[in-house]
Image (cartoon, helix red, strand yellow):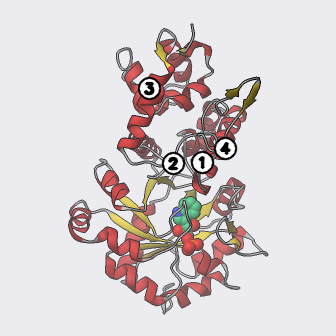
């Protein structure tokens, strides 16, 4: 049947990329009210067999391909999300006489670095999942120390010092800055941060673009570092949250420019079940408004860096905390983290004045020969006592 897509013929990964949680929800709503991407990634509370259940449920559904794309675009557009998910099929073919050709950037080439990272992550996660299915991860969770209180640590550091609580980042490289530190020993850096007064640590786990790893996260946890740990990853699927927890993460980053609201809600729920915190990251007013409308958000990061262009402007933090938004944030008792591009005590004072009670800092600390001492220089005084 031309132009008609029977979902039965597609592996679940293909279904996953083709359907946003929203339209998958629509498709399955009549037969099931189980979670959305949960079904896609085979994760539900108390069930490891959700994906097969899902395939059973959607096997009867026949929908036209244009309709699926329309729903997907509808939800993404309505939320202003510019980052598209990797297309499941190759680029469209064009024909001129006997010739076939494909055009660049017809939906098949990432439009910016963030989109490239997310598309790569999609592939990477589907491979990782095959090696470590969810039920093995769930078993591994029994051997991990219980999660530490990430938000509590930031609040008490703020109360203790009167300065924003520090999340110090263990970061070897980034696509915008290249290698930040050649002699990179993640455990040594983490211990130095802790000694210097960091409340929490952020550990980059992306290998390809940030030269990080889950092994670094695990090594830092196993070295006896007491600070709660943020798994700094591009989360596209709930499976990654379980994986991060199995490596010792206490908190997870969710990026609003990558994830639709329904995914954010669902992932927050999973983190709560696992006892983890979620840092939901925004970069503009629209993302901030979306996130403020989501129930259960208690930690918001304002990234001063635009992940699509790498432009950094610490004025973004101030802009997003002005007026009614700032008021709502105070009412909801949400803790705000100022992220990226912070180098001097004046920068720290500027974002504190804007209303943040925590900061996330990588480059300016990791580049110091003694990263822990770099903390005193950054804050203008010793915050370790
Ligand atoms: O090194 P900086 O400019 O101090 O930034 C740290 C942190 O904010 C940055 O690494 C970051 C913020 N959000 C992210 C999302 C993915 C990767 C990295 C990031």
Q: In which quarter of the image is ligand 1?
A: bottom right
Mark 4: few, some, or many residues within 10 Å (few <14, many ≥20)?
few
Cα distance between the residues tagged 2 and 1: 8 Å
Of marks 3 and 2, which one's residue comes earlier in the chain? 3
Of marks 4 and 2, which one's residue comes earlier in the chain? 2
Label 2 sits on residue: 83
Cα distance between the residues tagged 3 and 1: 20 Å
Q: Which numbered circle lies on residue 104?
A: 4
109 and 343: which is toward the camera? 109
Give residue 15's position: percent from left, percent from top.
56, 25
For residue 116, above or below residue 179? above
Q: Quadrant of residue 13?
A: top right
Contact between labelled residues 1 and 4, with CB atoms less than 8 Å apart: no
Give the structural element (helix, strand or loop) at label 3: helix
Contact between labelled residues 1 and 2, with CB atoms less than 8 Å apart: yes
Of marks 2 and 1, which one's residue comes earlier in the chain? 2
Give the structural element (helix, strand or loop) at label 4: loop
Q: Tell whether 355 sits left or right of 311.
A: left
């Amino acid at each position: 049947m031309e132009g008609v897509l029977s979902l039965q013929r597609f592996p679940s990964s293909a279904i996953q990329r083709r359907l946003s949680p929203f339209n998958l929800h629509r498709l399955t709503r009549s037969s099931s009210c189980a979670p959305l991407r949960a079904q896609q990634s085979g994760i539900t509370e108390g069930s490891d067999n959700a994906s097969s259940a899902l395939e059973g449920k959607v096997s009867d559904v026949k929908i036209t391909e244009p309709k699926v794309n329309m729903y997907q675009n509808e939800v993404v557009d309505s939320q202003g999300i510019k980052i598209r998910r990797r297309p499941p099929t190759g680029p469209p073919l064009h024909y001129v006489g006997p010739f076939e050709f494909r055009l660049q950037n017809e939906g098949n080439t990432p439009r910016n670095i963030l989109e490239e990272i997310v598309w790569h992550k999609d592939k990477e996660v589907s491979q990782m999942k095959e090696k470590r299915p969810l039920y093995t991860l769930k078993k591994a969770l029994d051997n991990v120390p219980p999660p530490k209180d990430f938000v509590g640590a930031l609040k008490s550091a703020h109360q203790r010092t009167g300065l924003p609580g520090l999340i110090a980042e263990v970061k070897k490289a980034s696509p915008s800055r290249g290698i930040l530190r050649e002699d990179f020993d993640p455990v040594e850096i983490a211990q130095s941060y802790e000694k210097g007064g960091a409340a929490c640590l952020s550990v980059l786990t992306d290998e390809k673009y940030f030269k990080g790893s889950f092994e670094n996260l695990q090594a830092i946890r196993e070295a006896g570092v007491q600070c709660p740990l943020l798994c700094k990853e591009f989360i596209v699927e709930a499976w990654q949250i379980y994986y991060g927890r199995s490596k010792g993460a206490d908190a997870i980053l969710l990026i609003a420019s990558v994830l639709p609201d329904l995914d954010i809600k669902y992932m927050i729920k999973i983190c709560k079940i696992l006892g983890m915190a979620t840092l939901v990251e925004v970069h503009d007013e629209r993302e901030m408004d979306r996130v403020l409308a989501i129930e259960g958000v208690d930690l918001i990061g304002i990234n001063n860096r635009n992940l699509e262009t790498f432009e950094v402007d610490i004025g973004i933090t101030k802009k997003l905390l002005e007026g009614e938004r700032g008021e709502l944030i105070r009412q909801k008792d949400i803790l705000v983290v100022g992220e990226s591009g912070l180098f001097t005590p004046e920068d720290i004072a500027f974002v504190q004045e804007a209303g943040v009670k925590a900061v996330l800092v990588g480059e300016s600390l990791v580049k110091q020969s003694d990263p822990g001492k770099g903390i005193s220089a950054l804050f203008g005084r010793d915050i370790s006592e």
